[in-house]
Image (spheres, rainbow, N blue to C red):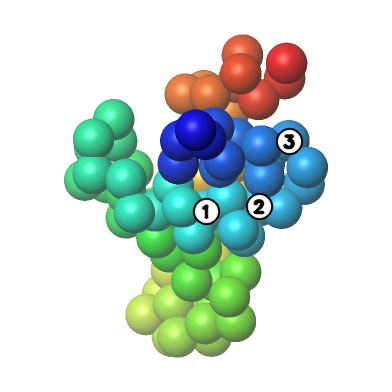
Amino acid sequence: METKTSKAISLLHSGYLKEALAIFSTFRVGFSKEERRTLKIAHECLSGNSVFYQQLGIDTDKEIEKSKSLLFEKYGQRWLS
C-alpha cells in the first residue's frame, strides 16, 4: 500500500510540485507550525491565489523556494533515489 509520504515524494520526483505540496501541506507531524505555513502558502500560490498573498505583503516566490528547500532537506535522500 502506498503511503501519503511516498506518493508525495513520487510526485516531487516526477516534477509535480503543486500536487506534492497539496499532500505535504496537510501533514501535521514532522513539520513545525512555520514550516506547515510555508508549505500551505506555496501550495496556495501555485494554485492561483498568489495575488492574495502578495496583497498581504508576502513574497510568494520566496515562499515557494523555501518550500522546495524544506522538502529537499527533509526528503532529499528519498527524493533523489
Give the mark nearer the N terminus: 1 vs 3. Answer: 3
| Residue occupying image coordinates x 60% and y 81% | 48
| Residue occupying image coordinates x 60% and y 58% | 19
Q: Which residue is mark 1?
A: 21
- Please identify the residue farthest to the front as the structure is shown: 1
- Disc 2 element: helix
Distance from the alpha carbon under mark 1 to that under mark 3: 12 Å
Horizontally, residue 73 falls left or right of residue 41, namely right
Q: Determine the image quadrant of residue 57.
A: bottom left
Q: Which residue is mark 2?
A: 17
Distance from the alpha carbon under mark 1 to that under mark 2: 6 Å
- Disc 3 element: helix
Q: Which residue is mark 3?
A: 13
Of residues 24 and 64, which is closer to you in this image?
24
Q: Amino acid at mark 1?
A: Leu
- Residue 50: x %, y % from top left: 54, 78
Confirm or deny contact between disc 1 and disc 2 (CB under 8 A): yes
Of residues 17 and 9, which is closer to you in this image?
9
Q: Amino acid at mark 2?
A: Leu
Crowding at label 3, few (<14), some or many (≥20) Cα neighbours within 10 Å?
A: some
- Residue 43: x %, y % from top left: 51, 63
Horizontally, residue 12 falls left or right of residue 62, namely right
| Residue occupying image coordinates x 43% and y 64% | 41
Confirm or deny contact between disc 1 and disc 3 (CB under 8 A): no
Question: Mark number for residue 48?
Answer: none
